[in-house]
Image (cartoon, rainbow, N blue to C red):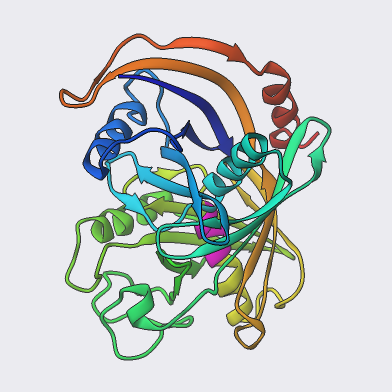
Amino acid sequence: MRLEFTKCHGSGNDFPLINARAVALSDAEWAAVARVLADRDGPVGGDGLLLLTAGDGDAAFGMRMFNSDGSEAETCLNGLRCVARAGFEALEIEQARVRLKVSTAEVAHVADILPGVYGVETRAGPAATDPAAVGVRMAMPAVDAFIPGLPSARAFTAVAMPNPHLVTFVDTVDEAELVALGTWCEAGPELLVDRANVSFVEARGADLFVRTHERGVGLTDACGSAMAASVFAAGLTGRVAFGTWTTVFNPGGRVRAMAAAPGDGAVVTIQGNATFEWDGAVEVDVEAERAGEVEVVRRRGDEVAAWAMVVGGG
């Protein structure tokens, strides 16, 4: 079948995005499409596959996100900004409630973060630390605490956004250590109900630098829900005050973020880019999990150049 898509990214977290409102595929078939199109060695590549889906109830539209291994994530906040932009353009609106896998989120088009860089604000949550919500088999919430059974002596905060995150604050990110722990979590240990995203976070003055091993993806340049979980964890541990904006950096770029305290709703607000790089089309044999040659329909060089100014600090 022929699939049209947009190659996009939020903070360097990149995806093929499909307007799937009128595309009828089963979950297993979408998982196969994700494995084909998000394969880094394939014709497109990405951290996963984004789908803009039809709305229902009070949600103007929906989002689904399949990781590159074909598993479906509860949410993806960098991807949500891209899907929000696609929904805004398809429906000619500027704000909406979006249906996610197990929750909803509020999204709105905001001023460009720099000239030519399309900006979207997302409000997601409530964040939770209850072990059952996070999917960690332990009796009490972990807030800056050692987690029995985890092969690390570091203190972690376990947060659901609603997908599961283990966040630890470090002086300097050790990527080898992060990958080793993330790989252990990815293997589906008894401690974790459905694996977990693992983030090492450096507090840099009033800002945060986040490095994440993402469930179903591996070491990634950006993970929006991990940035949200890290800001919430920073609030819980007194590193960043609840209700204040902070800048969150990662190798892919940066966003502005603010977390509300648990007593104020525990919602995390993120403002960041939704950059569309190019539009394409490709024939995909879903059963055989093979893709043909990609046809590039439109290149969006101005947007790519504008984002390069952000990453370069311009």
Q: Is residue 215 visible?
A: no
| Residue 201, quarter of picture | bottom right
Tag count in the figure? 0
Residue 178, x across and y down, in percent: 38, 55
Q: Residue at x 55, y 31 (%)?
A: 8
Residue 233, x across and y down, in percent: 55, 74
Residue 229, x across and y down, in percent: 53, 66
Q: Residue at x 36, y 31 (%)?
A: 38
Q: Residue at x 50, y 59 (%)?
A: 226
Residue 208, x across and y down, in percent: 64, 60
Left or right for 79, reference 2: right
Q: Residue at x 66, y 18 (%)?
A: 300
SS majority, magenta:
helix
| Residue 166, quarter of picture | bottom left
Q: Is residue 220 visible?
A: yes
Out of 236 and 23, give the one closest to the viewer: 23
Q: Which residues are magenta?
A: 224-229
Out of 271 and 137, give the one closest to the viewer: 271
Out of 91 and 9, give the one closest to the viewer: 91
Quarter of the rendering occupied by the N terminus: top left
